[in-house]
Image: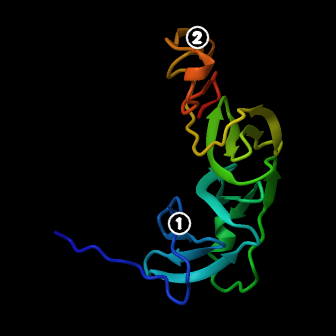
């Protein structure tokens, strides 16, 4: 059996909350409370730190319009998109800036997922404010907002072809309001929370 290894985060009082890999696997990102540490996989060495003024709540790596982004959700309600190529430039000492931001929540972004349909790319984000926000990434703007009235923690997205709304056995209208746990709410064709 191969031996496992632990990667120690030195000179920092914070623990790693998230680990995400670049799409090629050449780099990985460790999300701490208020920054991301960018590691080169082959050396397991930090090559860059990306500090935040707000608390980091979630991070994912996506390819959008042929650009690889590290997308972060912050506790101030914003989503920031960092070009992975900029994050991995070792010779560049300046602090990386996001290529663009999306602001549509009032507080903590808890989760988000990318959804592609008919050559269109959407990002579905949820927050402790109870809102599900659908972003059209071509427009870089909101196309739908749904307020659940609940504190949301996670989101999953599936195509309507997986299960069409008309054929679902249980609908939200059929459930007694007092028995609803809101742990699974299906939005037709877009997402499930």
In-front residue for pair 44/167: 167
Question: x, y percentage for residue 172?
Answer: 61, 17
Q: Quadrant of the N terminus?
A: bottom left
Which SS class for mark 2? helix
Q: Is residue 112 above or below residue 165?
A: below
Q: How many marks?
A: 2
Question: Observer-nearest residue: 171 or 99?
Answer: 171
Q: Where residue 100 appears, x then y in whole percent?
A: 80, 58
The residue labelled by disc 2 is 174
- Return the residue at label 1: 17
Q: Quadrant of residue 141?
A: top right
Upstream in sequence: badge 2 or badge 1: 1
Q: Identify the residue at horizontal 63%, vertical 38% (top origin).
A: 115
Q: Are marks 2 and 1 in contact (CB under 8 Å)?
A: no
Above or below, 104 relative to 42: above
Distance (Cα) linking label 2 and label 1: 39 Å
In percent of the image, x 20 and y 71: which residue is there? 2
Foreground residue among 102 and 28: 102
x 74%, y 67%: residue: 54
Q: Which mark is residue 112?
A: none
Q: Position of residue 117 (x, y in %)?
A: 64, 31
Residue farthest left in this picture: 1
In the orientation shown, which residue stands out farthest toward the front?
178
């Amino acid at each position: 059996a191969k031996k496992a290894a632990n990667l120690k985060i030195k000179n920092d009082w914070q623990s790693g909350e998230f680990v995400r890999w670049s799409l090629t696997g050449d780099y990985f990102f460790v999300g701490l409370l208020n920054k991301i540490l960018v590691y080169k996989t082959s050396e397991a060495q930090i090559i860059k730190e990306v500090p935040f003024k707000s608390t980091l709540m979630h991070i994912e790596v996506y390819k959008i319009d042929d650009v690889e982004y590290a997308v972060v959700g912050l506790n101030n309600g914003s989503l920031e998109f960092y070009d992975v190529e900029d994050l991995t430039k070792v010779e560049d000492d300046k602090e990386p800036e996001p290529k663009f931001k999306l602001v549509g929540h009032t507080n903590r972004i808890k989760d988000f997922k990318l959804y592609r349909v008919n050559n269109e790319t959407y990002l579905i984000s949820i927050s402790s404010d109870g809102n599900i926000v659908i972003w059209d990434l071509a427009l870089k703007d909101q196309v739908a907002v749904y307020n659940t009235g609940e504190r949301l923690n996670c989101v999953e997205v599936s195509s309507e072809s997986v299960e069409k709304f008309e054929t679902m056995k249980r609908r939200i209208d059929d459930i007694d309001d007092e028995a609803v746990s809101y742990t699974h709410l299906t939005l037709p064709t877009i997402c499930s929370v």
